[in-house]
Structures are given as C-alpha cells and as structure tokens.
Amino acid sequence: MSLREAASNLVGWVDYRLPIVKTWKTHMSEYYAPKNFNFWYFFGVLALVVFANQVLSGIWLTMFYVPTAEEAFKSIEYIMRDVSSGWAIRYMHEVGASFFFIVIYLHIFRGLLYGSYQRPRELIWIFGMFIYCLMMVEGFLGYVLPYGNMSYWGAKVILNLVGAIPIIGEGLQIWVQGDFVVGSATLGRFFALHVALVPLILIVGIFLHIVALHQVGSNNPEGIDIKAHVDADGNPLDGIPFHPYYTISDLTPVVIFLILFFACVFYFPGGGGYFIEPPNYLPADKLSTPEHIAPVWYFTPFYAMLRSVTIDSFGLDAKVWGLIIVSGAMLVLFFLPWLDRSAVLSMRYKGWPSKIMLMLFAVSFVFLGVLGAKPADWAPAWVAPALTTIYFAYFLAMPVYTKLEKTKPVPGRIGAKSG
Amino acid sequence: MDREIFVKLWLATAAISLFPLCSIASSNSQELLQSNIDIHNKASLRRGARLYMNHCAACHSAKFMRYERLSKDLEIPPEIVMSDLVRFGATRLSDAIPAAIDPKVGEKAFGIAPPDLTLEAKYRGTDWVYSYLLGFYKDSNAPTGYNNHLMANVAMPWVLASLQEATSEAEFKDQMRDLTNFMAYMSEPIRPFRENFGKYVLGFLMVLLVSVRLLKNEYWRSLNE
C-alpha cells in the first residue's frame, strides 16, 4: 500500500465518522467567493491572524504572570528581563492588542462602505458587533493586569462608572472588583475572565460569525449577489473557490501585515506612548494619580462621549448620562441592518447623502478618539457633544436618507458596465 | 467618472482623519533637549554605568536590574563587577542594584523617597532625563542651593555639582548623555538586541513577501486568462 493510498484510507476512515471532507468543501474548496475582493477585504483574515497571535502569546504569558497586587508588576518585569524571549512574547501580545483594534476598525469600516450588514447578512453583523464588544471587555481586563499606575487608575475610573449606576451601582461595583478597593481580588478575577471566560465566548462568536457568513456568502465591493448568476453546476459565475485562490492570495496581505506588526514589535513596542502609556512604567500607586488619565487609544472615542456630558439633568448625575450615551452608542450598532433602508448595498451605488454621512461619521469617530486621548479642556466644550451628535445622526437619520436618496442602478454581473 | 469622485471622497476622509492624529504625534508641550543617545554604543553605556553607580545608586535603587545582566550586556568582566560595582548590601552577581540608604531615611532627609530608577527612562523619556540632568542651576532660595528648570523646587540635591564644576560644558554634556544612555539601557536591557534582531525578522518577511506574491501570480494565472 503506497503512502498516498494509506493517507486516502485514513481520510476515508475519519470522514465516515466525522464530516471533514464535506466541511472542507463547504468552507474552503467549494466556498465560492466573489472574484472582485479589494484592499478592504483583507481585514477579516488579518483579524484571525491577530487573534491566533493573542491566544498563543497569551498562553505563554500566563506561565509567568502572577495576578496579585504585590507581584503583578514585578512579574511583567520578570518576563521582560529574565524569561527567555519573554520580552518578544509580551511585546507581541501588547502590540497585538492595538493591532487587533486597528484591523477590526478597518474591517467594520469595510462593512459600512459596502453594506455588508444589509440583508441577508444581518446576523453576521450582529455576531461581529458582539465580538467587538467582547474585545473591548477583553482589552480593558488585559490592560489592568500589568498593574502599572495607568492600569490601576484606568480600572478605578471604569469601576467607579459602574458605581455611578443609580440604586444598584455601589453594590455592583464592589461585587465586580471583589473588594472595597481595586486590589488582588480584582486582579485575580480579571485574570480569570481575561484568559478563560472571555476568550472562550470570543471563539464561539468568531465561529458563528464565519458560519453565518458562509451560509449566505460574502458580499463584495459592488454589492452584487453573485448567486443570482450560476453556471450549469450551480456555481456562481462571478465567484471563485476560496481555496486555493483566496487562501493563496491572502498570504500577501498577511505577510505585509506581519512586516508592519513586527516593525512595531521590534522598533516601536510602546506605540509612541499610545500602546503602553508612560505612567504604566510605574507600579500601581493609590496615592499618586497620573497627571492625565486617558484610556488606551482604542477606547478613546467612547471615552470622549462619556465625558461629553458635563451637566446633571433630570435628576441624574452627568456621569450617568455619559454612561447612557456610551451604552446607546454601542447598542445602536446592533440595529444598523434595520436602519439602512437602501435598495442597494455598496456605497458605489448609494446616493450622495449616504456617502457624506459615512464620511462625517468616520471623521467624527476619529476626532472623538483624539479628544478622548487629550485632557478634557483641550478643545472647547461644545466639540465633543457636536461630534457625538454626528455619530448618532449617522445611525438615527439613516432610515430617512437611505430611503429618500436617489441610488444608481446596480449591474447584474461583476465587471459589467454600470447602468 | 463617478468612481473617481468616490475614490477622492474617501481619500479626503482619510486625509481629514489623519490631520488630528498628527496633532497627537506632535503634542509634546515641554521644551526638551535632544538626548541623541546611542544604545548600541557599549563604551558609552559602560561610562554611564560608572556614573550611575558613583552618583545615583547611593539613594536610588534599580530593583529590576541585575549586576549579572549588566556584566554580560556591557561586557564588563564579572570579577570587576563584583569588586567595583556590587555593594550597598548586594552580595551576589545575580542581585539587583539596591540603594545605599533606606527609602524611609531618604524620605525623612529629602521629604520624598528617592524613586526606583530602573524604568525611569521609559516613564519620562530619555530627552526628559537628559534635560533634567542638565537642568540644575544655582538658586540661593532652594534648601539644597540648587533648583531645576524641568522640575521646580526639586527635592533631589544636585549630586553632580562638583563634577559639573570640574569639567568643561561640552564634556559634562557628553557625560550626561552617557548617563542617560545607561538609564535607557537599564529601562529595557533587551533593546540593543531587539533592534539588531528585528532587521533579520523583517528581512526574512520581505523575502517571504516576494515568494507569496509569486505564488499568487502562479495560482491566479489560469483565472486571468
């Protein structure tokens, strides 16, 4: 029996008991993806690459990290100095966290640009937003673990926010932090959640995101349904098998991504004070507040919204209003598929109002991010509320402008002349 | 035509979005001197280590920096490290650098405990450390007789005053650059290796990039025909 026969027999044996061949075909070799994917379609696979990096580097970090108030900071320096290649693993994890959000923000923007959230991909979008929210939780938990001074004060600010919730807040805060103050009990549970619970749910979320995607098929920059035109075998004429075509061509963006990623790991591991904020080089100190407490950059747009309310009103604290606004900003994302009433998917065929609103939305989100990273008095007080208004207007006015605007006719086939 | 407008629109979006990011990058408000250190210059690091051990280590600990690492990285023979540098209660090569005085005594003497300096260069930045070291000036109102441009009413006595008076200005600047360099090294001893090793990793990835691109062309050729 040749080796080839033996391998084929083994596959046959397993396949009789576990549908590996069918799964491979459904999701890889006979999964037809549109042939016109562009730059914006790289970020899904890149997110998977970073996720794998976070899991692997994270597992190694758990071998040396000690989740107590006394030892946490020391154990990080131990990893940086005494653990063989510990510095590389730690930097990969820390730079990876920021790169995860860069990739995810571009991935989400792609969705907005080409209407990837619209029918029939509503569930893919919802799973995606679920993953995004969980990632923010994961990022926050992970940021506290090194127990530098910014970790400590950042945790305090966020946990005090929990405490600001009327009636149940105070008890909830103590329950979440496990003590009357942020300390070892907090680190212990944050560690458990960061390395076990949240990643487990994330894996389920990613699995559902991809299964739902493969059920309805990928969108494309034209927003054309490739399943509408099939050949004699029922395969889309404008589609190509994901494997080998996209598995091979995706290697190029993956390697380019790795070049940028490792350039950061080796030459800018602190991200200019944005991946690791300088106060985090000091151990947590409850007596010394950092001059200016700012969350790590990927939270800053929401932090700016949180701070945008400065007046107590309707019997509620300004802080509570901030919390309501941020929750609303997250919640509204989940309803996006039903807010867009356009008949077309891609921005290429949507009208001017959609284009301008998306542009305003993107700019306001970036500006909010800048505001959130700066001290509260850096810009006039009206700027953050104005930008927050634009953020919400993009979503809340969407049913109106997408319904009323004049769209362009979408060609039936990819590559055909428009109109 | 319309496609073009669309592309222009998102280029404009990107440009507008990048504008405030630039303001983040250049937001350093304090006027600092450029330290221009060279972390790969071992002679400078050795000179800096000597300055550090002679002038700083009496009051400041460096509790994450081991003598052994110093000996290996800066190529100072262990015997010399043991005889010249291991002191203030440290007894073994594997010990970390302690301070000579008890932090509590320091706090009583200066009003504030002298901070551990292992990560100071990372926390403040090397330009800050360099500017601080060159920022001391005579001030008869200050309790120690010296004040600092960067940190008004600084608690630290100007321990390098005699050295500063005994050397020329240019020479003193060089010495402070060496000291800053050593503190940068101490804050991250792996940095010289990291910066060297990174070249090989990036080089490998560049080669990989060319090969995966050629592989893609090979696979897609039949599609494009």
Image: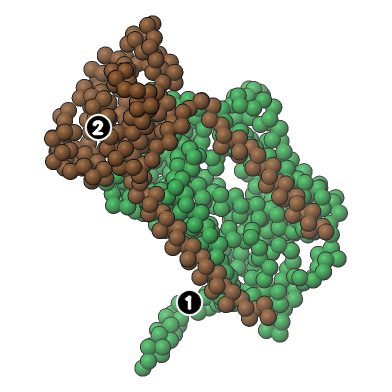
Chain colours: A green, B brown
Q: Is residue A384 rendered to the left or right of residue B62?
A: right
Q: Quadrant of residue A110?
A: bottom right
Q: Nearer the viewer, residue B217 or A36?
A: B217
Q: Is residue A418 rendered to the left or right of residue B166?
A: right
Report which residue position mark 2 lands on: B50
- The residue sitting at 59% across, 26% down in the picture is A376
Image quadrant occupied by the C terminus of chain B: bottom right
Vertical placement of residue A35 versus A46, above or below = below
In the rendered structure, the residue with mark 2 lies on which chain?
B
- The residue sitting at 28% across, 34% down in the picture is B47
Q: Are marks 2 and 1 on the same chain?
A: no
Q: Nearer the viewer, mark 2 or mark 1?
A: 2
- In the structure shown, which secondary structural element does the residue marked by tag 1 occupy? helix
Report which residue position mark 1 lands on: A20
Q: Position of residue B124 (x, y in %)?
A: 42, 30
Q: Position of residue B121 (x, y in %)?
A: 38, 33
Vertical placement of residue A248 versus B21, above or below = below
Q: Residues within 10 Å of mark 1 (few under 14, many from 20)?
A: some
Q: Position of residue A15 (x, y in %)?
A: 46, 81
Task: Tell me the amino acid under the disc marked 2.
Answer: Arg
Residue B155 visible, this angle = yes
